[in-house]
Image (cartoon, rainbow, N blue to C red):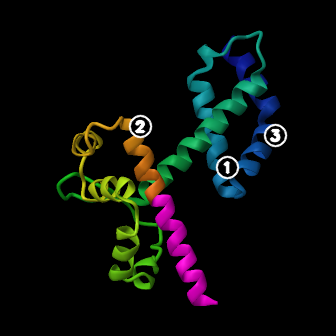
Amino acid sequence: MRTDKFLQNFESLSQYLKAFAIKLTRDKNVADDLFQETALNAFRHRHKFKEDTNMKAWLSTIMKNSFINQFRKKQRRNQIQDRTEGSYFLNSFGGTVNNDGEVNVSVEELNNLINGLADGYRIPFQMAYQGYQYDEIKTAMGDIPMGTIKSRIHHARKILKNRITDLYDEVSV
């Protein structure tokens, strides 16, 4: 497509693109920037546009992708990088949530609930909690199938959760 014809088609769609930018950003100033970026990218990549295709859809896709990329950049700017060993990324914009579960459940009560489990559930659960790998638990349990080990750990967690819920529902009543 010739440059003059491309510009003419772009201008005929500019009102639609400006409205679409406002719809995406909900801010006129940001929408103007998005429109300009879309125009720049469209003109820069005009050789990729196939003449017999839908230019409105092509330009809308460019605008939508530009909007998404700007949003992602903004999200990355709101993150800080921790330079400690392991290079963890921490979100600077997220709030912390307090977990009152540790306060509400005493260690003694929790140990009593765990010790109340049948050995088939208690031993694999405790080993998993202590950091043993599934294959190590399997060996310690006498080569029980891996699926059984995983199932017992899962069921132990479920049983403990239900017992804690029951215990504290009774206390709050």
Range of residues picked out in magenta? 157-173
- Mark 3 lies on residue: 15
Q: Percent x, y for residue 63?
A: 66, 37
Q: Quadrant of residue 98?
A: bottom left
Measured Cα–Cα span from mark 1 to mark 2 = 58 Å
Q: Residue at x 33, y 80 (%)?
A: 107
User: Relative to 37, is 26 above or below?
Assistant: below
Front-most of residues 50 and 3? 50
Which mark sits nearer the N-terminus, 1 or 3?
A: 3
- Mark 1 lies on residue: 32
Give left or right: position of 10 versus 98. Answer: right
* Disc 1 secondary structure class: helix
Identify the main secondary structure in magenta.
Answer: helix
Q: Percent x, y for residue 140?
A: 22, 45
Front-most of residues 46 and 99? 99
Residue type indicated by callout 3: Gln
Please state, as top left, top right, bottom left or bottom right, where the N terminus lies in the image. top right
Q: Percent x, y for residue 33?
A: 62, 48
